[in-house]
Image: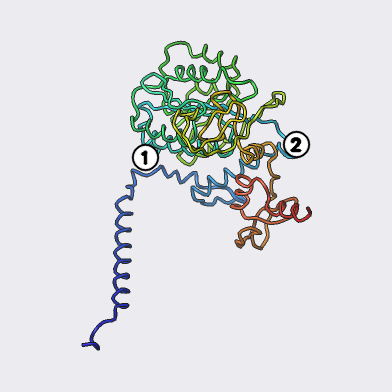
Amino acid sequence: MDGNRVPKTFIVEELLTEFEQRFDIDEQREEEAYAQYAWEKDFDKSWEQLVDKDGVLQFVQQKDRHETSASFERIVSSEDLQGAIPKRGVVRNIVIMFDVSDGMREVDFKPDRLHCAFGAVKALIQDLFHQGPMTQLSLIALRNKRSTLISKMGTTPKEQIHLLDAAIKEGAEGAASLQNGLEMALGILTGMPPYTTREVIVIFGSTKTFDPGNILATLQKLRKEHITVNAISMAPEMYILKHICHETGGTYAVSQDSVHLKKLLTTHTLPPKCWMEPVLTKVGFPPLEKANTASLCICHSNLTYKAYVCPQCHSKSCNIPTKCKCCGLYLASPPDISRMFHHLIPPKQFTQEIFEGECSSCGMHLTSGWRCPDCNNLYCGHCDQYIHQELQKCPFCVSDTTNRM
């Protein structure tokens, strides 16, 4: 009896093997279930994936084409920053105005224009607050020829995204009124301090606008209040929207696909150039205090035991960075201020070289890479992008400076 008994270890191994096989089959079936038909996928546009290299047309993947273009634009846009400290408006007031009309139901963007735009806006909100902590944001939806305020200035990023999720559940409906949205943005931005930026970012998916009056009169108000309008169209170019952007000193672009849309929105995370005189701004560094008894916060009027105490008026706020709703003082932490000033003193651009070796950071084998002009270390493209967009410092340059100290 004992000789014919199968050991328990073999039984367990057989069960695990059978489970893994079933799991792989279920995973494969799930992928097949979610697979798109050819007519449901994005437009291929294979003719746009041909690039000219040394006089020879070569086929490149769509993702690689976008990454190459983004890397090239990043280097060109920062050429004027070499050797000088630029003036940029790091204290920003931004109104994001997006179309929620019937035109956003088109499926040329997957799954449709509406969901694609909302996903891109969520990523933009996180990037704006990450790279510019002293940013105030407000959201406006254009639906049924009216403008609806989704979130007010001073709302935290987490609350902004939560309100966006609630707004998308209502779906796209009616027609969009560009003038009503700009008038609401005017009312929000007019009272902002002169040392802050006043920006409007429009995401529009329609080819027409239904306005109650003369939109050119609204344009004159925007110019008078020094409000910059930037727009990204998910539909064919609309002349009046492009005209408003150019007259207010903003930019206008037409998105080709979802990847291009995110790339266009990413350009707005960099604070705009500012030609005003430098102004000293009072900033408070509130301590995080815990109490045995609950008290009301100034931002939500909720009872809380833990909050940041304003050093000027001693009111309590749940999160920082923010603007105190009681006295108007900007509240931030030292890392927030440091992250904000990275835009004023960006790291030097690396020079591209062809060589055979390894990346100094991740150790990846390279045939070409990027060299730091100060410490002469070599990096791959991913590490170069991470240094310039996240670290804002060359790690080996910082290490050399620390060793000398």
User: Which of 364 and 295 lies nearest the eye of the viewer?
Assistant: 295
Residue furthest out toward the left: 1
Q: Do the residues labelled 1 and 2 touch (CB within 8 Å)?
A: no
Query: Is disc 1 surrounded by few (<14), some (14 to 19) or many (20+) residues within 10 Å?
Result: some
Residue 354, horizontal then vertical, whole percent:
67, 57
- Per the image, the residue denoted by label 1 is 111
At 31% from the left and 62% from the top, the residue drawn is: 23
Along the line of sight, the residue nearer the viewer: 6 or 213: 6
Q: Please rate how many residues cluster around mark 2, counting C-alpha atoms within 10 Å: few if below 14, some from 14 to 19, many from 20.
A: few
**In front of the other: 402 or 220:** 402
Q: Residue at x 61, y 25 (%)?
A: 197
| Quadrant occupied by the N terminus | bottom left
Q: Which residue is drawn at 54% across and 52% down?
A: 58
In this view, 243 is above or below 67 = above
Q: Is residue 205 above or below residue 366?
A: above
Q: By what rule are the colours in the image chosen?
A: rainbow
Q: Residue furthest right?
A: 404
Does residue 221 sit above or below 336 in this rendering? Answer: above
Per the model, the C-alpha gap separating discs 1 and 2 is 44 Å
Closer to the camera, 207 or 197?
197
Q: Which mark is residue 84?
A: 2
SS category of the residue bearing label 2:
loop
Q: Position of residue 124 (x, y in %)?
A: 51, 36
Q: Nearer the viewer, mark 1 or mark 2?
A: 2
Residue 361 position within the rendered picture, expressed as x and y whole percent measured from the top left: 64, 58
Query: Total marks drawn?
Result: 2
- Quick one: label 1 or label 2, which is nearer the N terminus? 2
Kind of residue indicated by mark 1: Pro
Q: Is mark 1 on a helix, strand or loop?
A: loop
Name the side, left or right, on which 122 lies relative to 81. Answer: left
Image position of 124 with respect to 193: above or below: below
